[in-house]
């Protein structure tokens, strides 16, 4: 049986672990050659590449901070050098930090907006220079943009910006036959949510109460939607924000 993404090239930002790593592996399993972008976790990125190549797939790791223009230019020049083209971009790189209003600072704001919003824009701007008709851009947002939970003002605002950018760019890039969609996960159990103390916390209990399916998600709840949006199965889907959140909205 032919693979859905055979011959395609994909860049996945923030792909050294968590949702990004699972998406990178899934795209590779469907035949795409994958660029595993990472900011600082070289060892983890190399592990993802080894996992992909060990299963017969194609992948390389490329360092780059998505909020820095020079790093992004290098990311795509390395992609072109390795594979000669670009078909799929997954804007997965993101950071989060929850804080009540009285704890919001310039540093807290810029840390999240520089990666979650500016980084997404800079990466997409560079990617479309290398992407032809049929290209697919997949943004990773969050249901935080619509849940609007207490202590999430900065993070929720950054992800609401992702929702808006997805809709605007779908119209802006549509004439070039490049599709733009967003996946908005709920709380997903990753290395990050463990390190941030969210797993096993009252926050997790709240999420599980809000989710009609009664549980937090796993990375393998997310990647099937990414494969769908990357493939020709979704060739007439653009400008959509798909919540993959156990029913939370």
Image (spheres, rainbow, N blue to C red):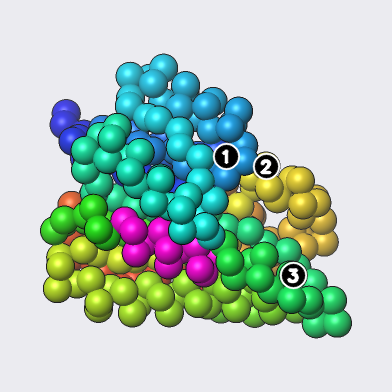
Magenta-colored span: 116-127
Cα separation between marks 2 and 1: 7 Å
In the rendered image, which quarter contains the N terminus? top left
Using the rendered image of the protein, determine whether residue 220 is visible from the camera's viewpoint.
no
Q: Are marks 2 and 1 in contact (CB under 8 Å)?
A: yes
Residue 54 or 9: which is nearer the viewer? 9
**Left or right: where 200 falls relative to 3:** right
Q: Nearer the viewer, mark 2 or mark 3?
A: 3
Q: Which residue carries the number 3 mark?
A: 107
Give the vertical position of 83 relative to 77 (above or below). Answer: above
Residue 36: assigned label: none
Residue under label 1: 17
Few, some or many residues within 10 Å of mark 3 (<14, 14–19, 20+): few
Real-space Cα separation, disc 3 to disc 1, in angstroms? 25 Å
Identify the mark nearer the N-term, 2 or 3. 3
Residue that label 2 marks: 191
Residue at (18, 52) in percent of width and height: 232
Q: Quadrant of residue 125?
A: bottom left
Q: Secondary structure at mark 2?
A: helix
Question: Residue 122 magenta-drawn?
Answer: yes
């Amino acid at each position: 049986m032919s693979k859905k993404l055979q011959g395609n090239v994909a860049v996945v930002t923030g792909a050294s672990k968590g949702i990004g790593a699972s998406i990178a592996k899934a795209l590779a399993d469907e035949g795409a050659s994958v660029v595993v972008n990472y900011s600082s976790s070289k060892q983890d990125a190399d592990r993802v590449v080894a996992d992909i190549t060990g299963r017969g797939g194609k992948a390389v790791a490329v360092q780059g901070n998505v909020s820095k223009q020079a790093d992004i230019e290098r990311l795509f020049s390395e992609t072109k050098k390795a594979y000669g083209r670009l078909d799929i971009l997954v804007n997965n790189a993101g950071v989060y930090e929850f804080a009540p209003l009285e704890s919001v600072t310039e540093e807290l704001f810029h840390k999240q907006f520089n990666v979650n919003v500016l980084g997404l824009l800079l990466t997409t701007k560079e990617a479309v220079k290398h992407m032809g008709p049929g290209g697919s851009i997949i943004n990773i947002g969050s249901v935080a943009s619509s849940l609007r939970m207490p202590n999430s003002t900065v993070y929720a605002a950054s992800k609401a910006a992702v929702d808006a950018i997805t809709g605007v760019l779908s119209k802006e890039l549509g004439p070039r036959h490049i599709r733009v969609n967003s996946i908005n996960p709920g709380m997903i159990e990753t290395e990050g949510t463990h390190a941030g103390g969210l797993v096993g916390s009252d926050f997790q209990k709240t999420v599980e109460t809000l989710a009609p399916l009664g549980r937090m998600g796993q990375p393998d709840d997310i990647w099937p939607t990414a494969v769908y949006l990357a493939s020709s199965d979704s060739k007439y889907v653009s400008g959509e924000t798909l919540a993959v959140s156990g029913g939370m909205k």
